[in-house]
Image (spheres, rainbow, N blue to C red):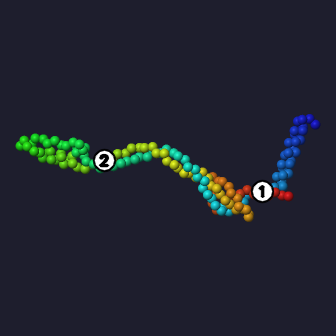
């Protein structure tokens, strides 16, 4: 036999062996009871922007370090009515709110999968799944024939 025919014969025999093995096994799908599903988490650190505001209670800027000077009244002495009103405004309490955006590095926990324990027949198995299963999961069953 020449080389090309030997390769073809070997490939044919391998294919027949595979088909014979497949014919001896039955594969089907069934459902198994879920016993538990434990989340698998991962902590990542991300930067987020947050607005931080603070309120300052105080007096008007005129009172803080500055005093309203008296003007000369018509009589030439003391405070005028306008001076008293200006001083009253300067003495009024004032609330100031200031806000700024700050960058904060915060840990964030996310679920990356679930460790699932399930029972099929009389055996318990574990498997990792991407999504949380319900009460049962689909399993592939292969039965080998003797």
The label nearer to you, 2 versus 1, is 2
Q: Determine which quarter of the picture holds residue 75.
A: top left
6 horizontally vs 120: left or right: right
* Depth order, front residue of 12/108: 108
102 horizontally vs 91: left or right: right
Contact, CB < 8 Å: mark 2 with mark 1? no
Residue 88: where, in percent of width, then height?
19, 48
Q: Which secondary structure lies at badge 1?
A: strand
- Tell me how far mark 2 sits from mark 1, CA to CA: 74 Å
Going 63% across and 59% down the picture, which residue do you hit? 37
Can residue 91 be seen by looking at this rendering?
A: yes
Residue under numbered circle 1: 142
Local crowd size for mark 2, using a 10 Å CA cut-off: few (<14), some (14–19), many (≥20): few
Q: Determine which quarter of the picture holds residue 114.
A: bottom right
Residue 7: where, in percent of width, then height?
87, 38
Query: Which quadrant does the N terminus fall into?
Result: top right
Picture disc at residue 51: none
For marks 2 and 1 on the same chain, the one whose residue lies earlier in the sequence = 2
Q: Which secondary structure lies at badge 2?
A: strand
Local crowd size for mark 1, using a 10 Å CA cut-off: few (<14), some (14–19), many (≥20): few
Question: Outermost residue, bottom direction?
Answer: 122
Question: Outermost residue, front direction?
Answer: 65
Above or below: residue 12 compared with residue 37: above
Going 33% across and 49% down the picture, which residue do you hit? 55
* Depth order, front residue of 74/107: 107
Residue under numbered circle 2: 96
Residue 129: where, in percent of width, then height?
65, 54
Going 79% across and 58% down the picture, which residue do you hit? 143
Can residue 74 be seen by looking at this rendering?
A: no
51 horizontally vs 85: left or right: right
Query: Which quadrant does the C terminus fall into?
Result: bottom right
């Amino acid at each position: 036999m020449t080389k090309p025919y030997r390769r073809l014969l070997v490939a044919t025999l391998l294919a027949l062996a595979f088909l014979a093995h497949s014919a001896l096994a039955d594969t089907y799908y069934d459902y198994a009871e879920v016993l538990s599903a434990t989340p698998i988490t991962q902590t990542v650190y991300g930067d987020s922007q947050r607005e931080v505001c603070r309120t300052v209670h105080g007096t008007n800027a005129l009172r803080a370090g500055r005093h309203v000077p008296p003007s000369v009244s018509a009589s030439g002495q003391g405070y005028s009515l306008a001076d008293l009103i200006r001083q009253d405004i300067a003495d009024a309490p004032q609330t100031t709110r200031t806000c700024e955006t700050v960058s904060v590095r915060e840990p964030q926990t996310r679920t990356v999968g679930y460790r699932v324990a399930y029972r099929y027949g009389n055996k318990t198995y574990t498997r990792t799944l991407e999504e949380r299963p319900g009460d049962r999961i689909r399993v592939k069953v292969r039965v080998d024939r003797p």
